[in-house]
Image: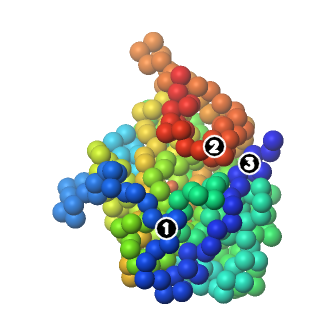
């Protein structure tokens, strides 16, 4: 089975359309039982997502100390905010504007790009597999952006928003450059040669998910995206506007990732967890919504190329450290993930099924 046909979702109403009906209360399918969940860290918490300055990593004088910081960030958090990068604010803002303009189009204009049966790509919701499943307070459009031959342009908005395709093309290339560079530093932080994974990520896939979280009359009872770990190699997230929403599970508490202007949130995905033999872990995270404003985020899932074997890096395995994860081809890995999304939740995290 080809991996691109594995994901599929049952169509459900657009949350933005629901909100436009001036709801006072939330329909029951969106109400989650969040009481037995982990607490959210108090506003004055001392827990702050680490910030890594890539210009220090590139600087001969500061390289070593920043690399240590990167190692600790990946080991203790699995997430960090990247600053000092060369993607200019204008380029980020341009894609942010286009995604916002897309979600603000009329429903019938957005529906031109709706997901089709058997494909996750397009406008809609991810992984709705049953009619009684709880729903997330989020509309999204998911597009494969790189390599260019994987694009399904039918799902790419064309006339409206004007220049959407150009902006996404530029954005995806920017994200690939950042990913290749950061993956080199992650290899070094693991004590490996900087080039260990570079080629795999240069030729890898870059899938972009644009999320729109409309305001909600009862934000504490719904969830924008429920708790999950990303299956990517790494994920790059840019927040449009300064609206907090992303939370990361750290030491049993949900900690808000505070938006930094032009910062890029980087998180370790399950592929890098496997490759690092669990030295770095893919963190659980979720998105919360608020009462007042739409929140938009742009998420780029960065994958190695299809020839890359997903297994603990050989250089990390010796008589003192045995491999903790099995070995998979790219297709086996994707297939086993998508097969699980079709089943009802058995409580076993996907990553645990990869362990020896
Ligand atoms: O929008 C966010 O803050 C989180 C999005 C996310 O985790 C995802 O799309 O996988
Ligand atoms: Fe995620």
Q: Earlier in the sequence, mark 1 or mark 2?
A: 1
Quarter of the image that includes the N terminus: top right
Q: How many marks?
A: 3
Locate residue 304 relative to residue 3 in the image: left or right: left
> Which residue corresponds to mark 2?
343
Q: In this rendering, which labeled residue sits more in front, label 1 or label 2? A: 1
> Which residue corresponds to mark 3?
6
Q: Depth check: 171 or 140 in front?
A: 140
Q: In this rendering, which labeled residue sits more in front, label 1 or label 3? A: 1
> Which residue corresponds to mark 1?
28
For marks 2 and 3, give the CA distance: 13 Å
Q: Quadrant of residue 141?
A: bottom right
For marks 1 and 3, give the CA distance: 29 Å
Residue at 37% in and 57% down:
34
Locate residue 105 relative to residue 16 in the image: left or right: right
Residue 67 visible (yes or no): no
- Helix, strand, or loop for circle 2? loop
Residue 211, how many percent across, how many down?
A: 55, 69
- Helix, strand, or loop for circle 3? loop
Residue 159, how many percent across, how many down?
A: 75, 85
Q: Earlier in the sequence, mark 2 or mark 3?
A: 3
Rate crowding at label 3 as few (under 14), some (14 to 19) or many (20 or more) other CA atoms within 10 Å: some
Residue at 65% in and 54% down:
129
Q: Earlier in the sequence, mark 1 or mark 3?
A: 3
- Helix, strand, or loop for circle 1? helix
Q: Is residue 141 above or below residue 199?
A: below
């Amino acid at each position: 089975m080809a991996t691109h046909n594995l994901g599929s979702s049952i169509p459900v109403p657009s949350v933005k359309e629901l909100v436009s009906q001036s709801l006072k209360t939330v329909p029951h399918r969106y109400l989650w039982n969040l009481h037995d969940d982990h607490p959210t860290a108090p506003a004055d918490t001392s827990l702050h997502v680490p910030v890594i300055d890539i210009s220090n990593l590139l600087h001969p004088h500061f390289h070593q100390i920043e690399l240590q910081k990167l190692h600790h960030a990946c080991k203790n958090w699995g997430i960090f905010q990247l600053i000092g990068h060369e993607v200019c604010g204008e380029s980020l803002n341009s894609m942010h504007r286009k995604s916002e303009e897309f979600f603000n189009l009329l429903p019938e204009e957005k529906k031109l790009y709706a997901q089709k049966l058997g494909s996750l790509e397009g406008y809609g919701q991810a992984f709705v597999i049953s009619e009684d499943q709880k729903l997330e307070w989020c509309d999204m459009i998911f597009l494969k952006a790189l390599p260019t031959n994987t694009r399904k342009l039918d799902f790419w908005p064309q006339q409206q928003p004007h220049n959407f395709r150009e902006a996404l093309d530029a954005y995806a290339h920017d994200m690939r450059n950042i990913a290749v560079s950061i993956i080199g530093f992650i290899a070094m932080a693991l004590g490996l040669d900087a080039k260990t994974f570079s080629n795999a990520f240069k030729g890898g896939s870059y899938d972009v998910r644009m999320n729109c979280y409309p305001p909600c009359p009862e934000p504490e009872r719904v969830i924008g995206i429920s708790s999950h770990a990303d299956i990517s190699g790494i994920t790059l997230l840019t927040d449009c506007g300064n609206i907090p929403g992303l939370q990361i599970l750290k030491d049993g508490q949900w900690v808000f990732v505070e938006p930094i202007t032009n910062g890029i949130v980087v998180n370790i995905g399950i592929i890098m967890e496997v490759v690092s033999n669990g030295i770095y872990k893919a963190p659980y995270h979720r998105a919360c919504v608020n009462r007042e404003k739409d929140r938009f985020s742009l998420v780029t899932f960065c994958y190695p190329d299809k020839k890359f074997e997903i297994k603990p890096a050989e250089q990390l395995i010796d008589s003192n450290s045995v491999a903790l994860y099995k070995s998979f081809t790219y297709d086996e890995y994707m297939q086993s993930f998508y097969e699980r999304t079709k089943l009802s939740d058995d409580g076993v995290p996907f990553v645990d099924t990869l362990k020896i």
